[in-house]
Amino acid sequence: MDLSPVDLTPFPTELAIKWSDGSENFVSYETLRRFCPCAACMGEKDIFGTTYKPPTRPYTAQSFQLVRWVAVGGYALQPQWADGHNSGLYTWPWLRQVATAV
């Protein structure tokens, strides 16, 4: 069975996620942003497996404010943060991994 969210409820500082297996998680926006999976945040690998990361950008209070999100197909969320960052695609497995790691 593929695990997917059946309900996503935004709160002022966290996202509540109810999963298709009946479990629930609450994950802070700060945690979601710090684990943004995009290449600008996590880096990207070349064909040899070497990860290249750009210079670290400092976070601001706006970095952790969720403006909105867009569903991407049936497999991911793309958050829009108040500081303008919006390139991360949080697939369901990645979102579950981040939500259960805290």
Image (spheres, rainbow, N blue to C red):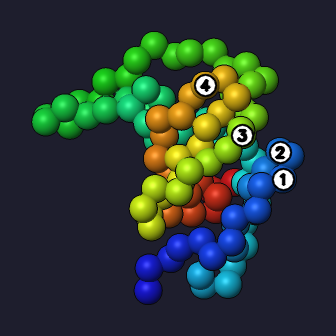
Which is more toward the observer, 82 or 63?
82
Q: Position of residue 56 (x, y in %)?
A: 52, 16
How much space separates mark 3 and mark 1, taking CA atoms?
Answer: 10 Å
Q: In the drawing, what numbered circle is on residue 66? A: 3
Q: Position of residue 83 (x, y in %)?
A: 66, 23
- Which residue is at 53% across, 39% downward? 36
Crowd around label 4: few <14 · some 14–19 · many ≥20 (10 Å): few
> Would you say residue 70 is visible in this rendering?
yes
User: Mark 4 or mark 3, which is nearer the start of the sequence?
Assistant: 3
Q: Residue at x 75, y 47 (%)?
A: 28
| First in residue order: circle 4 vs circle 2 | 2
Element on which disc 2 rests: loop
Marker disc for residue 11: 1
* Amino acid, disc 1: Phe
Q: Quadrant of residue 51?
A: top left
| Residues under numbered marks 4 and 1 in contact, where contact means CB atoms less than 8 Å apart | no
Residue matched to label 4:
84
Q: Amino acid at mark 4?
A: Gly
Q: Are marks 3 and 4 in contact (CB under 8 Å)?
A: no
Element on which disc 4 rests: loop
Q: CA distance from mark 1 to mark 2?
A: 6 Å
Locate residue 81 relative to residue 28 in the image: left or right: left
> In this rendering, which labeled residue sits more in front, label 4 or label 2?
4
How packed mark 3 is, by other alpha carbons closer than 10 Å (few <14, some 14-19, many 20 or more), is many
Amino acid at the residue labelled 3: Leu
Q: Are marks 1 and 2 in contact (CB under 8 Å)?
A: yes
On the image, numbered disc 2 is attached to which residue?
13
Compared to residue 58, the image places residue 84 above or below, namely: below
User: How far apart, in angstroms, are the residues tagged by discs 4 and 2?
Assistant: 17 Å
Question: Which residue shows up at 40% across the image and 17% down it?
Answer: 54
